[in-house]
Image: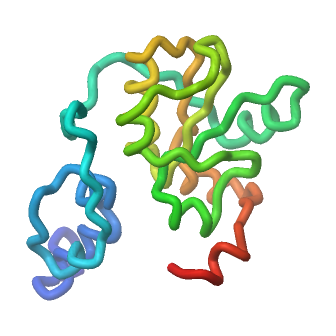
């Protein structure tokens, strides 16, 4: 940072890209690749009937704190945990017992579980989880929550992550 409130001109875009923006916006919703940082991101095309948008509805989605989710995972009736990040992100580390369910899948096809099933959604920081939760609520799911602060909060709480080492060896 140059001074207290300004980014160095040479590092401004990189700093914003890696520390402020959520890459999911670039992957799903940005039609162009303007900056060098976004050139290698995968481009996912949403199904034709899914309207991309970055503005989320005002409908509140309940959140669960990392430590509370840790406790729920050890209860007699744990919720289903879905990680809505891209598969390559999921394999690098995720909440134990979480299943990979990329956002594009949530947005593009109905989820084949009971609408009364308790579900917690996770992602890196919470943006994708919120978007997925709103999509599931629109499909009629009644008990959908997001992990407050996402996997970043899970890590900050010192909770263990599951990693798929065999899958990591096969590629990025």
User: Residue placed at 17% from the left, 75% from the top?
Assistant: 13
Q: Is residue 119 above or below residue 66?
A: above
User: Foreground: 24 or 87?
Assistant: 87
User: Residue placed at 48% from the left, 53% from the top?
Assistant: 85
User: Residue placed at 46% from the left, 39% from the top?
Assistant: 129
Q: Where is residue 158 in the image (x, y as percent from the top left)?
A: 72, 59
Q: Is residue 154 above or below residue 4?
A: above
How was this image coloured?
A: rainbow
User: Foreground: 115 or 123?
Assistant: 115
User: Residue placed at 84% from the left, 24% from the top?
Assistant: 77
Q: Position of residue 66 (x, y in %)?
A: 67, 42
Q: Is residue 115 above or below residue 44?
A: above
160 sits left or right of 60 in the view: right
Residue reaching furthest bottom?
10
Q: Where is residue 72 in the image (x, y as percent from the top left)?
A: 79, 31
Quarter of the rendering containing residue 44:
bottom left
Quarter of the rendering containing residue 24:
bottom left
**Considering the image in quadrants, where does the N terminus appear?**
bottom left
Q: How many marks?
A: 0
User: Foreground: 79 or 50?
Assistant: 50
Q: Position of residue 107 (x, y in %)?
A: 36, 35
6 sits left or right of 75 in the view: left
């Amino acid at each position: 940072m140059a001074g207290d409130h300004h980014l160095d001109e040479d590092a401004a875009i990189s700093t914003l890209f890696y520390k402020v923006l959520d890459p999911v916006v670039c992957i799903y919703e940005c039609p162009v690749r303007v900056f060098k940082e976004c050139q290698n991101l995968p481009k996912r095309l949403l199904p034709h009937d899914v309207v991309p948008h970055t503005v989320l509805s005002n409908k509140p989605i309940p959140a669960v704190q990392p430590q509370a989710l840790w406790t729920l995972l050890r209860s007699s009736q744990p919720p289903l945990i879905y990680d809505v990040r891209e598969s390559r992100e999921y394999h690098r580390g995720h909440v134990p017992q979480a299943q990979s369910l990329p956002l594009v899948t949530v947005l593009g096809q109905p989820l084949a579980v009971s609408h009364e099933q308790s579900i917690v959604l996770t992602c890196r920081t919470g943006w994708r989880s919120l978007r997925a939760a709103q999509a599931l609520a629109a499909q009629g799911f009644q008990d959908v929550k997001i992990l407050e602060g996402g996997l970043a909060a899970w890590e900050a709480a010192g909770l263990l992550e599951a990693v798929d080492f065999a899958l990591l060896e096969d590629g990025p």
